[in-house]
Image (cartoon, rainbow, N blue to C red):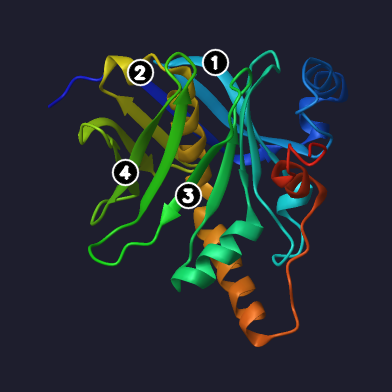
Amino acid sequence: MVNSLKRVTVDFWLTSLHGEEIGIRQKEQYRSKSRYFTLDMDIIGKYKEDGKGIGFLAIRRKLWDKDPLESRMVMRLFTDEGVWMGTIEEVVSEEIKRSLGSNDIIPVFIVTIPKHKYLIWLEKVHRRLGWGEIYVFNYIDDKDNKAYTCIIDEKRLTIGSDWEVYEASSDEKVAFIDSKKLNLGGKVEVELYKRNIAGNRIVVTVLALFSSMLKYKGDIEKRIRKRIEMVKRGGWNYRLDGGEMRILRNPRRVLG
């Protein structure tokens, strides 16, 4: 048994906290701390590191509760003071493209982290053989400009949703994600085993946000499946919302 160097916990509440429940003044304080705490944010759970409360998770409720063909998951992590720590958001247009191309259901996300210059693509990959799902992401190290790949491999025949995380370059298991679905709201724990991973703010945040996404993964997959059916039926194309348009915009469009 490998001893963990760090433990991250995402503890979902049975019900989310709407603006009326957290108080207008508190919500205004969060909004003053970060423009990422938007009016439609619902707080859905607590974020801890090594048992200590660090912050909270919130989802853009109006965007998620839209018509299933138009909805999109945008989840954000904040400190207890309301400072933005990171975002995971669904990229529906890419999901449709990759799902059609692979004849599979392929969730696709972008993770953004403050002061990190690069977008982090986190996505399921089509698996021809074997059991379980695989997600992958790269992170770019500013110090050496190298891209490092992490593989998140689902373990089958377990209670809940459990995943092993590997560094692609060494094939070494660096983390384990344990989704405890038997408690009322839902709880996910991430055990980090390798020092360079446990101390890496980017990787820890990505794994925390991926673990948080698992609560919504089943609904995300159902919505992708419905969109694929609509595309194949003919006469329907997905209309991107403003947030997805902005994140996919060409940064070099004014050059040339």
Q: Which structural element holds mark 4?
A: strand
Q: Earlier in the sequence, mark 3 or mark 1?
A: 1
Residue depicted at 62% across the width and 17% down the height: 115
Q: Position of residue 123 (x, y in %)?
A: 47, 49
Q: Earlier in the sequence, mark 4 or mark 2?
A: 4
* Mark 2 closeness class: few <14, some 14–19, many ≥20 residues within 10 Å: many
The numbered disc on residue 198 is 2
Task: Tell me if label 2 and label 3 are in contact, CB under 8 Å.
Answer: no
Q: Position of residue 56 (x, y in %)?
A: 61, 25
Alpha carbons under labels 4 and 2: distance apart: 17 Å
Left or right: 219, with 137 as reference point:
right
Which residue sits furthest bottom? 233
Closest to the camera, between mark 3 and mark 4, is 3
Q: Is residue 182 visible?
A: no
Closest to the camera, between mark 3 and mark 1, is 3
Closest to the camera, between mark 1 and mark 2, is 2
- Residue, disc 1: 54
Task: Tell me if label 1 and label 4 are in contact, CB under 8 Å.
Answer: no
Task: Tell me if label 3 and label 1 are in contact, CB under 8 Å.
Answer: no
* Mark 3 closeness class: few <14, some 14–19, many ≥20 residues within 10 Å: many
The numbered disc on residue 64 is none
- Residue, disc 3: 123
Closest to the camera, between mark 1 and mark 4, is 4
* Type of amino acid under label 2: Ala
Q: Earlier in the sequence, mark 1 or mark 4?
A: 1
Q: Nearer the viewer, residue 47 or 69?
A: 69
- Residue, disc 4: 163
Closest to the camera, between mark 4 and mark 2, is 2
Q: In the rendered view, would you say 114 is above or below 133?
A: above
